[in-house]
Amino acid sequence: MARVVVFVVGGSCAASSVRILHYGAPSPSSERCSRCVRRDRSHRSFKPPFEDTAAYLHALDPTVQYRDKHSLETCYEPLFFFRKHPAVEFHHPIDAPDSMFDRVILTEWAKPAMRGVLETISSHHSANLELTEFSLKDLKIFCNYQTPEFKPRFKLVCGTRNATFEGMRMNNIQAGQIFKEIVNASLGTPSSWDILIEDFQDLLQMLENPILEEAYLMRNHPALLALKLHSQFFMACYETLMRASLQSVFEVFKMLPYGMNDSSGHWKVRLEQHPYLWWMLHSQFTSYGDRNSEQCRYRRNYSCHKIHHLTKRTERFKWYSANDVDMLLYQYLPMSLPGLMRAMWHEGLLALFCLRLDELFTK
């Protein structure tokens, strides 16, 4: 008797499908590669995707659900994968004098993988479809260890149906629950939740109580943006903001985090806790006030002048890479980018100036 496996792969709604593989039965002609077609001219059945019994038993292992002999990727179970490759990691800021800003942050490979889940949900919603109920057990991880860049992909194995308001909300809530379980599986200790980076906590809160009109902000949240693109992201927002009306600019500045009455602390006080950030704040040819507009000006100068001529006072910073500099600002002002993006969104500036921030996430 032929064995049948039904595999639903999430992606764009147009590409979502139910793929049926018949072990020992002919596959559709569209599935055939040229080698198989030549071998099957006598209309004999195709070989199953497993070459032998040993390979088939390997596929029954809990770490591997399905292995296609024509694919270089292997599908892994989430719990096994995240124990071996955590999606979050502990990070102490370079040369930080204390542990005040030690944080658990997302790994760079986990950011596009998580965003892929939100992109799948959003693309289905835009086609008036929703995903059926899913959880961590419905998440499959595809990875090819032979590539130079470690780049796993997350795929949801579930069905689709006509969209409802509550169903679309539940899709986002379930995505947030999956992300929390990924963090738990990666950390192994609940105590580390206390120092989870603030921007990712903000994304989890948005998914826990989703506002469907803010789907763009959720799937393009800066918490899921590669660190190397933070400066480019900010400069795109800042240059657009400088073209807006004064009234809009003032409203955006009022909504930015780390202002005078922010319980998280004033932005200058936070920056002064690190020697490099203090030096960038006080030892340059410009001075900064306390207003939020000055916070943006500082960040603009910080992004544009990461490399300086070394002096006796800056000798200790000579080993800092651009990544180190970006990571410092990220850990000391983690809500800066999400706050700026959200403020510009509510003022309608992203749509007014056709600012496509989502394109940065695909670089």
Image (cartoon, helix red, strand yellow):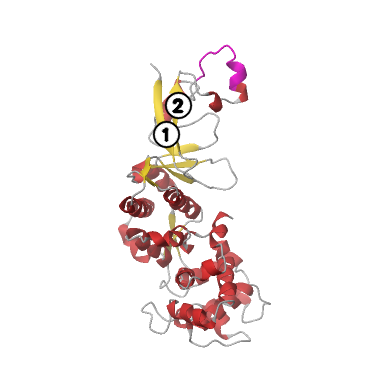
Q: Nearer the viewer, residue 259 or 264?
A: 259
Residue range of the region highlighted in magenta in the rendering: 36-47
Using residue 12 as the reference point, say whether residue 187 is left or right of it.
left
Find disc 2 in the rendering and name its residue. 21
Asked if residue 273 shows in the view, the reply is no
* Residue 172 vertical position relative to residue 244 in the rendered view, above or below: above
Instruction: Report the amino acid beneath label 2.
Output: Leu
Instruction: Judge whether residue 143 is colored magenta.
Output: no
Q: CA distance from mark 2 to mark 1?
A: 8 Å
Q: Position of residue 23 (x, y in %)?
A: 44, 21
- Name the N-terminal-most of marks 2 and 1: 1
Horizontal side of 344 relative to 167 (left or right) equals right
Q: Is residue 345 above or below residue 47?
A: below
Q: Is residue 67 above or below residue 298?
A: above
Q: Is residue 297 left or right of residue 192?
A: right
**Majority secondary structure in the magenta region:** loop
Q: Residue 132: x, y in percent?
A: 34, 43
Asked which secondary structure carries label 2, the reply is strand
Q: How packed is label 1: few (under 14 Cα within 10 Å), some, or many (20 or more)? A: some
Where, quadrant-wise, is the N terminus in this rendering?
A: top left
Q: Quadrant of residue 31?
A: top right
Query: Do the CB atoms of the residues marked 2 and 1 lie less than 8 Å apart?
Result: yes
**Residue appearing at x 43%, y 56% in the figure:** 88
Residue plotted at (36% across, 58% down):
207
Residue furthest right as drawn: 309
* Image disc number at residue 308: none
> Which quadrant: the C terminus?
bottom right
312 or 113, which is in the foreground?
113
Where residue 304 appears, as percent x and y from the top left, is 63, 73
Tell me the tag on residue 7: 1
Q: Secondary structure at mark 1?
A: strand
Q: From this view, report whether residue 155 is shown above or below residue 189.
A: above
